[in-house]
Image (spheres, coloured by chain):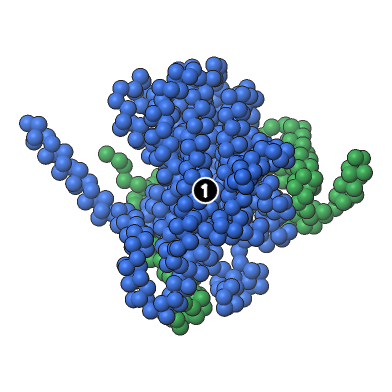
Amino acid sequence: MDMPPKRRPGELIFNVAIMLASLFLLYSAYGISGFEALSSPGVIPMATTAIMAIAGVFILRDTLRKGRGDQSLRRDILPAVVVVPIVMILGYALLLRPLGFLPTSALFLFILVRFLSRRSWGFCLAVALGTVIVIWAIFRLIFAVLMPQGIVPEGRIVAFITSLF
Amino acid sequence: MDILSNLLMPLLNLELLFLIGAGTFAGIYVGAIPGLSVTMAVSILISFTFSWEVYPALALMIGIYMGGVYGGSRTAILLNIPGAPSAIATALDGFPLAQQGRAGEAIGIVTVVSFIGGFIGIFALGAFAPLLSDFAIGFQPRDFMLLAIMGILLVGSLSGDSLVKGVFAGAFGIAIGAVGMDPLTIQDRFVFGIDELRGGISFVAVMIGLFGVSEALIQMHSIHSPAVRQRVAGIIPSWAKVRKHLPLGLQTSTIGTIVGALPGTGGDIAALMAYDHAKRVTRNPETPFGKGAVEGLVAPETANNAAVGGAFIPMMTLGIPGDAVTAIMIGALFIHGLNPGPMLMIEQPDMFWFIVGSLALANCFMLLFGLTGIRLFVKIVELPRTVLLPVIMVLSIVGAYAINNSLTDVYWMLGFGILGYFMRLYGYPLAPIILGVILSRLLDDNWRRAIISEREDFGAMMMGIFTSPLSLCLFLAVVMILVTNTPWWVRWRARKATGQTVAERQDHD
């Protein structure tokens, strides 16, 4: 016999938030064109958000029926190995424009690899610099993707490399 | 003649040949490395190949798709970690074989049968898609609307642990797709006075967030699990062995093609259904299923590769994705200004035959790379995830930024990444969201066209559905998907099954 499913930490709050957000979106969808006509731009948004809200109620009911599990929020849902990368991506997004792609990515990889692997500083530095150079070469030179330049004179480096050939 | 020249185009053009080869090679590794998925790779690639011509971009993505579906089996066999969802069934018998020291044999047979399955799917695509597209020209807007609903519901009901969460995810995707200015009336929808929202949310940012960042965050939980080493030898299987399993392979390839061709269902479901079929039809396996039965490898691997060709059928003929990867490819075609559907097949048949040719070539590359280079493979798969996951995150950020050179997309990507992380943890399937986003426009347009053509009369539209055989079939399919997933139906089936067993027992006595 299967064990009845247990509620995970934060599941109830998440599902309540999902339902409230769905209700808010339904209200917002109603504001688009109300019940003006069946072909009005608000009909599909209203129908989908209504489905979301109804599904949200059922999901919440199922969640309430489940017993409390023995998992903990800190260990199973938001352990440090998840929180740190999230915070670091946020930091990355904020620093990307002022610092530029190359230094931000190198810094991001260096800190995150060091945090996750606990390997030596030298190893992490080599991985960070090596990876950034490979990514940059592939995407800047082959895919022609333009990333924020920031403090590194990337244009001049590319001009120098192309002048070699 | 035209068909032949388009079919052979990827073979005769060196650039395209190289891209398909490189894509397949990369795909095998992407599919094999746990934590990297084909869906993730293809969504990140869309933004990078944005500035390319459409053919090279498609060539690369097709290679990755084909290689990736196959690559998932490698780690399923060697490490008992399916590299991709479509390889879940492969691990059931593949890993026991590896434990018996027969990993090489398992990889060999999987490679050959994947190749066979792949070709059957591609053949079905080439043979049936043109017929279907001629037929699809006569589809009414209401039929497209019903097909879109069916696709979202099907993937919602099959990919998660509860239908209601799948339905929520699909509806959420449609709502995301509706954000921005309505193209018909230029009225704002879900804009909340924020200018950036007026142009809509970039679906590439949503995809990279849901499949790149959230997957990487989930993988963080098991980041310190140690790598397992395997010895691999004797790859190429004997012809006698392949021939022995060919009849089963042909049956499961057919299952794979059909399941792949259903809107919304892809290789993962095809593989599980084929595995189940193999268990039922194989009377006396040499080794029992679950303990290293070769049939347990042949069935899912033929089916998931056949599903690749199958998944392109609804994508090319109806503009409705067969699975998450083809959903992203539809997105890629949109970006290149093309609108997949029956008209594209008629106006640009060369593109269709180019896709068929590229798939066939990728399938050959898969066989070639699959039977060689295993040593390098074993080394790369052992790459520490502590390095791999941060790199995936950088790629995701670069990918999201590259779509419009805008940080807003990076924030969206991050937001959906975090949301996707929690949704995964709490048992919500994510694939219906992507299907919803991609199909939102199709659904909205066709609903409005259908209801306007009936002069806003809902009753007349329903009459239209009930009096057209095609619309009625689609409508019944939608109803069936919903009904068969309700708890009442499940309980009724269970009761019926118990009743039958009791009756059988009484007959026996």
Q: Is residue B188 above or below residue B102?
A: below
**Quadrant of the image containing the N terminus of chain B:** top right
> Which residue occupies the extreme bottom position in the image?
A36
Give neighbour class at mark 1: few <14, some 14-19, many 20+ (Cα, 10 Å): many
State the residue at coordinates (46%, 53%).
B132
Observer-nearest residue: B426 or B93? B93
Q: Is residue B10 above or below residue B191?
A: above
State the residue at coordinates (45%, 63%).
B138
Q: Chain of mark 1?
A: B
Percent across and percent down for residue B12 are 69, 38
Which chain identifier belongs to the blue chain? B
State left or right for residue B492 relative to residue B472. Answer: left
Q: Residue B62, can we see it?
A: no
Q: Residue B344, can we see it?
A: yes
Colour chain A is painted in = green
> Which residue occupies the extreme left position in the image?
B509
State left or right for residue B141 relative to residue A105. Answer: left
Percent across and percent down for residue B183 are 59, 73
Say which element carries label 1.
helix
**Quadrant of the image containing the C terminus of chain B:** top left
Q: In the rendered picture of this protein, how many numbered marks are placed on residues?
A: 1
Residue that badge 1 annotates: B312
State left or right for residue B196 relative to residue B162. Answer: right
Amino acid type, callout 1: Phe
